[in-house]
């Protein structure tokens, strides 16, 4: 695969912009172009990743539009392919839409709306959209659509250029050795 696909420019998802057609497939496939490290890790250790189920892009677009949100395109791509995930036993990437039928591993509060409502009630600023919780809290800083981690206060503790950078430098860095994943690599 050409190197330029690995380093595709970062895009932001704007729900008011005409989107690409959704594939309609429920098969979970993480493309190398979008997120090489998490894709490779899920292929190597499928026992560590429990996807909530792919979401058609139109449903995410409608949710973002109704919530007046704009988030990075690579996070939208992740959601369309996986619907969110429990992984590494203690980590959750929240699902952007609710689930009407039972899905293994998905529990109440694993959706963005419920997760953010609780965290805002506990002191998180509305200028963030939490998308991950586990060992620490991760969010999108809504002003500039940057991936960040938040500390106890909650104050920002780190900033990341994209989804893959966030994954590689946070949870993967913490768990790579424990789960036999090659540190800092996507091969």
Image: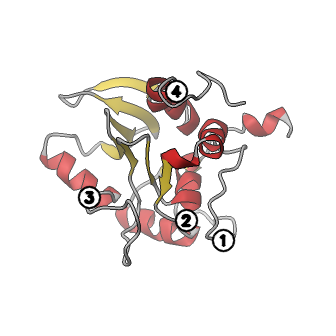
> Which is more N-terminal, label 3 or label 2?
2
Residues tagged 2 and 3 counted as in contact (Cβ below 8 A): no
Q: Position of residue 5 (x, y in %)?
A: 78, 40
Residue 72 falls left or right of residue 109? right
Find residue 109 and name its label. Answer: 3
Crowding near the residue tagged with mark 3, few <14, some 14–19, many ≥20 C-alpha atoms within 10 Å: some
- Crowd tier of the residue under label 1, counting other residues whose Cα lies within 10 Å: few below 14, some 14–19, many 20 or above: few
Drawn side of residue 142 relative to residue 181, left or right = left
The tag on residue 25 is 1
Return the x and y of residue 163 as percentages of the image width and height. 54, 39
Q: Earlier in the sequence, mark 4 or mark 2?
A: 2
Left or right of residue 149: residue 81: right
Quarter of the view holding residue 99: bottom left
Residue found at the very far left of the displayed protein? 122
Residue 137 can be seen in this image: yes
Tell me: residue 36, above or below residue 118. Answer: above
In front: mark 4 or mark 1? 4
Q: Disc 2 to disc 3, how far (Cα)?
A: 18 Å
Which of 19 and 22 lies nearest the eye of the viewer? 22
Q: CA distance from mark 4 to mark 2?
A: 25 Å
**In terms of sequence position, does the residue under pointer 4 or pointer 1 come before the other?**
1
């Amino acid at each position: 695969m050409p190197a330029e696909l690995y380093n595709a420019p970062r895009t932001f998802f704007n729900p008011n912009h005409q989107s690409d057609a959704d594939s309609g497939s429920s098969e979970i496939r993480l493309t190398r172009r979008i997120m090489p490290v998490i894709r490779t890790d899920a292929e190597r250790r499928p026992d560590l990743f429990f996807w909530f189920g792919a979401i058609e892009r139109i449903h995410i677009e409608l949710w973002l539009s109704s919530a007046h949100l704009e988030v990075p395109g690579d996070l939208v791509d992740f959601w369309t392919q996986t619907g969110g995930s429990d992984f590494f036993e203690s980590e959750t990437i929240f699902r952007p839409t609710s689930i009407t039928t039972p899905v293994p591993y998905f529990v109440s509060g694993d959706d963005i709306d419920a997760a953010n409502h609780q965290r805002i009630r506990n002191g998180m600023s509305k200028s963030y959209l939490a998308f991950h919780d586990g060992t620490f809290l991760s969010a999108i800083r809504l002003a500039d659509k940057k991936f960040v981690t938040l500390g106890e206060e909650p104050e920002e503790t780190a900033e990341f250029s994209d989804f893959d950078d966030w994954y590689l430098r946070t949870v993967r860095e913490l768990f790579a050795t424990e789960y036999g994943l090659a540190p800092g690599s996507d091969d």
